Image: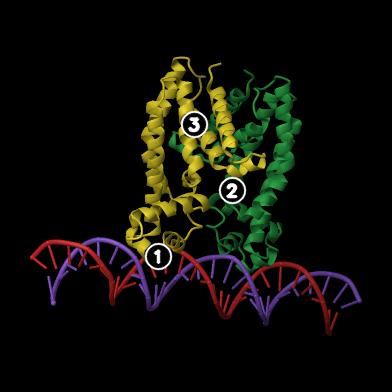
Chain colours: A yellow, B green, C purple, D red
Amino acid sequence: MAPSEIPTRQRILDAALDLFGNRGVDAVSLDEIARAVGVRKQTVLYWFASKDDLVEAVLGEAVAELLIVVEAALRAAPPDPLARLDALVAAVFRPAVRRPALLGLIGEIGRLSESHAAHLAGLLEPSVGRAIAALRSEMDAGRIRRADPALLAALIYSTVTGLATEARVLGAVGWTASPSGLRRLRSELRAFVRAALAPT
Amino acid sequence: MAPSEIPTRQRILDAALDLFGNRGVDAVSLDEIARAVGVRKQTVLYWFASKDDLVEAVLGEAVAELLIVVEAALRAAPPDPLARLDALVAAVFRPAVRRPALLGLIGEIGRLSESHAAHLAGLLEPSVGRAIAALRSEMDAGRIRRADPALLAALIYSTVTGLATEARVLGAVGWTASPSGLRRLRSELRAFVRAALAPT
DNA sequence: GCGTCTCTTTACCAGTTGGTAGACACCCGA
DNA sequence: TCGGGTGTCTACCAACTGGTAAAGAGACGC
């Protein structure tokens, strides 16, 4: 552990998150993760009893990390619903750019085993429930367009994360990841979501 | 070839599309594809010189299939831009429901090798270019909200396919895949995209 | 000095992977 | 009747997979 101050376990989690998120869980071997950390495969298996355990831990960390960022941004945001939406977009956007693997991994969830998916659903459930309740009350107050609040939440989610993760798609329409490109993308995303929710 | 009228090569492509789309390219072995077709792995390798070749062929077919459906729907749609959008949503939605692997595979593109991604970008380019041009001219005519047409196209894309593919996300908000659930989902998706594009 | 606890290692293993080599069966035109 | 395709097969292979067993290495209190 001497060469670095970060403990091995954490370094394994970090490396695994990047590799899993970028290339998919099944495409990454324990050997590869170990190599990235600078350690032998058996050290990985010392900290995580199996690859499955590692996947679960990585997913839990990724979700927790994202939830913390988002919840903090929402707590700091003004009460106006559209402004809160802007805050949400910005909060998801920052990690998406700085660490694309994080959202990539969230996107992986769909093809994981039932038990992993259920575990994650449990982690997400409180936040999702709160978001849906907030959307519903804003609808009742006439501040956003009336719609099915649960499906609306899913739509916002898929728009924001889908765009943030699929940089390839953006490349296909001539977008580049320069700082100005990022600003442009974020402002378009804001305008899009705002318009989609504005009361009729 | 006797037992079935569909030639082996096509049956391999079909099976591979389903498996790749549902579980990811790296997670599916040639043996598994062969088993699904009812043939030995070496027969797969007879028709496609390598797994990479097979991946390329499957992706090409998936993209072509989707483009045909979408282009046909758009040709049949009325000139009104929002109505055309409805047609687009419906066109993407149908295969997404009937054959979820198809869109799943498209979502896989992001993690493929550069050469595959470039190949697909080439296939998609004409349609994307046309879509962007159409959006721009509708903006000029004041029939949809003014925005960066290329990024707007990417946003629409990520909203529609993201939602259609991530059934797991929908499960997390209490949605179920019943016929009535599907109708509800499609109409919410329509309303969302319509609102996001409506002129201010 | 001695055991013990934590961490990382080397040495294996059985199963699976993508891929090669070559044989076998069948059909069809000469 | 024969020869050459065409398509599928059996038999292999080296490399890699996740995982087990057990042996150090170093720090710590005694």
Residue C22 position (above or below residue B115):
below
**Looking at numbered disc 3 in the image, what kind of residue is underneath it?**
Val
Question: Dot 2 surroundings within 10 Å: few (below 14), some, or many (20 or more)?
Answer: some
- What is the distance, in whole Å, between disc 2 and disc 1 at their CAs? 28 Å
- What is the distance, in whole Å, between disc 3 and disc 2 at their CAs? 22 Å
Image mark 1: chain: A
The x, y position of residue B100, in whole percent, is 58, 44
User: To which residue does mark 1 refer?
Assistant: A41
Q: Quadrant of the N terminus of chain A?
A: bottom left
Corner quadrant of residue C1: bottom left
- Near-viewer residue (A163 or B184): A163
User: To which residue does mark 3 refer?
Assistant: A89
**Looking at numbered disc 2 in the image, what kind of residue is underneath it?**
Gly
User: To which residue does mark 2 refer?
Assistant: B110
Q: Quadrant of the C terminus of chain A?
A: top right
Q: Determine the residue positioned at 43% across, 61% down.
A: A30
Element marked by disc 3: helix
Question: Dot 1 surroundings within 10 Å: few (below 14), some, or many (20 or more)?
Answer: some
- Near-viewer residue (A161 or C18): A161
